[in-house]
Amino acid sequence: MAVHWGSNRLSAPLAVLLLLAARVAAQTPVQQECLELCKKAELFKQQKKTAEAIAAYERAAALAPTAFGADAVSTGNVYHHLAELYESIGQLEKAVALHERNLKIREIRWGDDSPEAA
């Protein structure tokens, strides 16, 4: 498959890579930092380093409202992942508070009756 861009012909994989590179370049420094923290947190989680994963997600959760917006789905996703980690170590009050914040974002974004808010 080829994508035509002006008079140039690009392969589909190359076109996708160029679009992804443009999207990454468009991220603000705070967005990049937040995403890097999430990547680190997931790596720590895979390595069973729960304390380190929580610390990274806590920092990401602090940055997410500034990076993406307080009501952004990306912010809610950070809250969700941190809440799951809190659940895994029995810190249920913290987990519930984060799940509630995530749910509120989803309700704002898609409405109370949407599958995303269920």
Image (spheres, grey):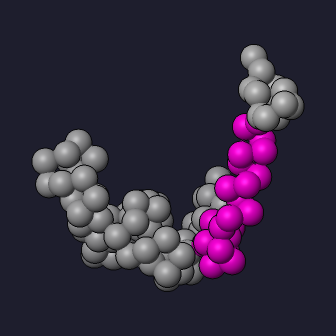
Question: What is the quadrant of residue 48 in the picture?
Answer: bottom right
Q: Is residue 24 magenta?
A: yes
Q: On the rendered structure, is 49 left or right of 63? A: right
Q: Range of the magenta residues? A: 15-36
Compare residues 10 and 106 and report the one nearer the observer.
Answer: 10
Compare residues 118 and 83 and report the one nearer the observer.
Answer: 118
**Residue 33: percent from the left, percent from the top?**
67, 75
**Residue 34: percent from the left, percent from the top?**
61, 72
**Residue 105: percent from the left, percent from the top?**
29, 65
**Residue 91: percent from the left, percent from the top?**
36, 73
Q: Is residue 55 visible?
A: no
**What is the chief secondary structure element of the magenta stretch?**
helix
- Rendered residue at 28%/47% (across/down): 116
In the depicted structure, whether residue 114 falls above or below residue 100: above
Q: Residue furthest front?
A: 7
Compare residues 54 and 17 and report the one nearer the observer.
Answer: 17
- Rendered residue at 14%/54% (across/down): 112
- Rendered residue at 86%/31% (across/down): 8
Q: Quadrant of the N terminus?
A: top right
Q: Is residue 60 visible?
A: yes
Compare residues 5 and 84 and report the one nearer the observer.
Answer: 5
